[in-house]
Image (cartoon, rainbow, N blue to C red):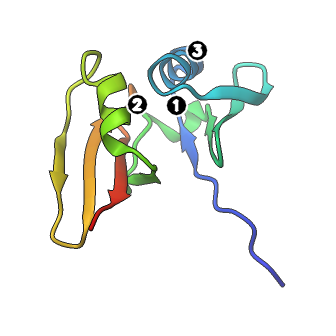
Amino acid sequence: MHFKALVPMLQTNDMSRTREWYESMLGFRCVAAQGNEWCRLARDDIAIMFMTNHHLGPAHATATQYIYVDDVLAVWDTVKERCSAECGPQKMPYGMLEFAIKDPNGYLLSFGQQVA
């Protein structure tokens, strides 16, 4: 038995806004969708899925979506004029250089790179 991937499935109340933000802000692309109810967004080796389940109430999560990148400062340079950091960029005591932003649903996205 081999586990192959973990792909978060997050809730959104506005699929169009969510897709547009991930595509324009972070360079994701929609690789699969079912109308305005579900989509899978991907970039490089990672994916995030979104669903609309209005019966569950407003979108919310207490977990951070942590994305490892090979050049965290380059990612920061592409987003810093269009959103504000929740923290960082900063070197953490556990050897990561990281920053965090929130998506339009309020989900925290942290980007990190191992540093010497």
Residues under labels 2 and 3: Cα distance?
A: 12 Å
Query: Could you say where residue 33 lies in the image, as x and y percent from the top left?
Result: 78, 27
Q: Secondary structure at mark 1?
A: loop
- The part of the image, by quadrant, that contains residue 29 is top right
Above/below status of 1 relative to 67: below
Identify the disc placed on residue 43.
none
Above/below status of 11 relative to 26: below
Query: Could you say where residue 64 lies in the image, as x and y percent from the top left?
Result: 37, 54
Identify the disc placed on residue 105.
2
Residues under labels 1 and 3: Cα distance?
A: 9 Å
Query: Is 20 or 60 nearer to us in this picture?
Result: 20
Q: Secondary structure at mark 2?
A: loop
Amino acid on which the number 3 mark rests in the picture: Ser
Mark 2 vs 1, N-terminal side: 1
Q: Secondary structure at mark 3?
A: helix
Residues under labels 2 and 1: Cα distance?
A: 6 Å
- The part of the image, by quadrant, that contains residue 92 is bottom left
Look at mark 3 in the image and give the residue it sits on. Answer: 16
Bin the neighbour count of mark 2 within 10 Å (Cα to Cα): few under 14, some 14-19, many 20 and up. Answer: some
Amino acid on which the number 1 mark rests in the picture: Thr
Q: Quadrant of the N terminus?
A: bottom right
- Left or right? Give the position of 73 relative to 105: left
Query: Could you say where residue 47 lies in the image, as x and y percent from the top left?
Result: 64, 44
Q: Residue at x 56, y 21 (%)?
A: 23
Bin the neighbour count of mark 1 within 10 Å (Cα to Cα): few under 14, some 14-19, many 20 and up. Answer: many
Above/below status of 64 relative to 81: below
Amino acid on which the number 2 mark rests in the picture: Asn
Q: Quadrant of the C terminus?
A: bottom left
- Left or right? Give the position of 106 relative to 8: left
Look at mark 1 in the image and give the residue it sits on. Answer: 12
